[in-house]
Image: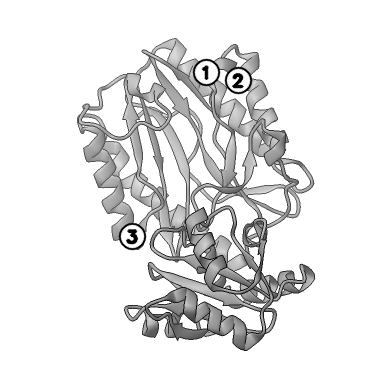
C-alpha cells in the first residue's frame, strides 16, 4: 500500500517539476500524510522525497522502528537540528525546488526552514490528499474490517442499554471493539439519549438512558490505521408519534442520499438528495451539517458532501463517503443515521452494516 502511494507521489512530483517535497510531522503537526506515504506510525518524523529517492528522518526513539515500517525509505537520524540535516540532504541531492505543505506548517516553522534550507519553496496544494481520495483494495479491506468490529460490538452492548448511563454504554462499546481487535477508537464515541440527542456532537454523560426515548450512538473502530464511522438511532421503548416520524424521515433521507452516491455524480448531489427529503418534511432548519465526508486514515477527509460548491468533487470508484443526515429538535431530541460507503463501478456499497430502519430495543 505505502510503496504504491510513494511511487504515485513521486510521479506527481515529476509532473509538477519539483525536485523534492518535505512532509513534516513532528509531534506538533498532523502525521496522516506521512503515514500514508511511508507506513511509519511513530509520533515524530520528516519525509524528504524526490522523484527517485526517499528519506525518512526521525529521532533515536524511532530509528529501528522506521527501518521496519518504512522499507522503501532511507532512514536517517535527524540530529539535534533537523533543518541542518535536511539542508545537507538537499545539497547532496542538488534539490533546488522544494515542495511543502503550506496549509499545515506554521509560519514560524516555515520561516526557520527558509532561513536554514537553501531552496525555492513551493506549496504542494494538497497533493497527498488528492492521492488519498481513491482508496486501494487494501485500504477498503481495513475499513470494512473496522466496520465489522464496530457492528459486532454494538450488537453485544445495545440490548443492555436501558438503565445504563451514556458514559457506561460508551465504555462498554469501546471495550467490545477493543476485544474484537480494534487498535483504537476511530474517534471518541458519541452516546446520547432523550433531549440530549438534539446536540449533534454531545459527549457521553452520567445521564441514565430511560425507556421510551431515542438513543443515538455515533462510533467507529480503527484497524491498521483506517477508521470506520457509523451512527445508529434506536428507540428504547415506545416513543411519541413525532419521534417516530423523525426516524422515518431521516431514514428516507439517508436512503435517497445512498441512491445518489454513484460514480460520475457529485458529492454535492448526495447532500442535495438527502437534504431535500428533510426540507420537504418541514425540518430543513433542523439539519445544520453536511450530509457526509470521506473516511480513511482520518475520520473526516475528502470528499465532502455538503452544500458548499467549493468543496464539491465528482465521485469515482474507490472513494469513501458517509451519508449521515439528521434532525435535531432542542428540548425534544434528535435522530441521525449514518453509513460509510465505498463508491463502486455501478453505485455504492455499504461498509457499515447495521440496519437503519426504525428499531425498538
The image shows residue 48 at horizontal and vertical percentages of 57, 76
The N terminus sits in image quarter? bottom right
The colour style of the image is one colour
- Mark 1: secondary structure: helix
Q: Which residue is mark 2?
A: 278
Q: Which residue is mark 3?
A: 180
Tell me if I can see residue 344 in this picture.
Answer: yes
The C terminus sits in image quarter? top left
* Camera-side mark, 2 or 3: 2
| Dot 2 and dot 3 residues touching (CB under 8 Å) | no
| Most foreground residue, 4 or 17 | 17
Residue 313, label in figure: none
Is 347 located above or below residue 297 in the figure?
Answer: above
In the image, is 197 to the left or to the right of 137? left
Is 215 located above or below residue 115 in the figure?
Answer: above
Tell me if I can see residue 106 in this picture.
Answer: no
| Most foreground residue, 121 or 3 | 121
| Dot 2 and dot 1 residues touching (CB under 8 Å) | yes
- Mark 2: secondary structure: helix
| Most foreground residue, 103 or 349 | 103
**Label 1 Cα neighbours within 10 Å, binned few <14 / some 14-19 / many ≥20:** some
Determine the residue positioned at 55% across, 28% down: 251
Q: Which badge, 2 or 3, comes first in the chain's sequence?
A: 3
Structural distance between the alpha carbons of marks 3 and 1: 36 Å
Amino acid at each position: 500500500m505505502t510503496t504504491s502511494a510513494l511511487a504515485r507521489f513521486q510521479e506527481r512530483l515529476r509532473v509538477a517539476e519539483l525536485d523534492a517535497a518535505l512532509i513534516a510531522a513532528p509531534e506538533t503537526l498532523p502525521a496522516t500524510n506521512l503515514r500514508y506515504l511511508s507506513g511509519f506510525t511513530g509520533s515524530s518524523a520528516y519525509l524528504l522525497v524526490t522523484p527517485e529517492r526517499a528519506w525518512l528522518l526521525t529521532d533515536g526513539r524511532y530509528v529501528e522502528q522506521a527501518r521496519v515500517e518504512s522499507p522503501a525509505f532511507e532512514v536517517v537520524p535527524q540530529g539535534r537540528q533537523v533543518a541542518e540535516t535536511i539542508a545537507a540532504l538537499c545539497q547532496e541531492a542538488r534539490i533546488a525546488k522544494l515542495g511543502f505543505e503550506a496549509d499545515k506548517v506554521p509560519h514560524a516553522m516555515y520561516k526557520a526552514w527558509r532561513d536554514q534550507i537553501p531552496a525555492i519553496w513551493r506549496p504542494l496544494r494538497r497533493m497527498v490528499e488528492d492521492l488519498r481520495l481513491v482508496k486501494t483494495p487494501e485500504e477498503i479491506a481495513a475499513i470494512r474490517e473496522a466496520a465489522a468490529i464496530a457492528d459486532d460490538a454494538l450488537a453485544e452492548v445495545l440490548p443492555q442499554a436501558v438503565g445504563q448511563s451514556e458514559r457506561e454504554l460508551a465504555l462498554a462499546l469501546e471495550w467490545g471493539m477493543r476485544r474484537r481487535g480494534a487498535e483504537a477508537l476511530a474517534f471518541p464515541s458519541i452516546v446520547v439519549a432523550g433531549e440530549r440527542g438534539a446536540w449533534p456532537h454531545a459527549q457521553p454523560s452520567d445521564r441514565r438512558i430511560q425507556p421510551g426515548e431515542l438513543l443515538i450512538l455515533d462510533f467507529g473502530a480503527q484497524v491498521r490505521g483506517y477508521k470506520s464511522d457509523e451512527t445508529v438511532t434506536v428507540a428504547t421503548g415506545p416513543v411519541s408519534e413525532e419521534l417516530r416520524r423523525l426516524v422515518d424521515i431521516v431514514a428516507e433521507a439517508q436512503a435517497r442520499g445512498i441512491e445518489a452516491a454513484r460514480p460520475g455524480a457529485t458529492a454535492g448531489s448526495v447532500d442535495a438528495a438527502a437534504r431535500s427529503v428533510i426540507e420537504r418534511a418541514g425540518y430543513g432548519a433542523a439539519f445544520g451539517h453536511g450530509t457526509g465526508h470521506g473516511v480513511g486514515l482520518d475520520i473526516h477527509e475528502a470528499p465532502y458532501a455538503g452544500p458548499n460548491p467549493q468543496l464539491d468533487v465528482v465521485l469515482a470508484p474507490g472513494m469513501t463517503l458517509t451519508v449521515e443526515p439528521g434532525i435535531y429538535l432542542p428540548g425534544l431530541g434528535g435522530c441521525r443515521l449514518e453509513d460509510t460507503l465505498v463508491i463502486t463501478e455501478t453505485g455504492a456499497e455499504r461498509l457499515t452494516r447495521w440496519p437503519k430502519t426504525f428499531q425498538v430495543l
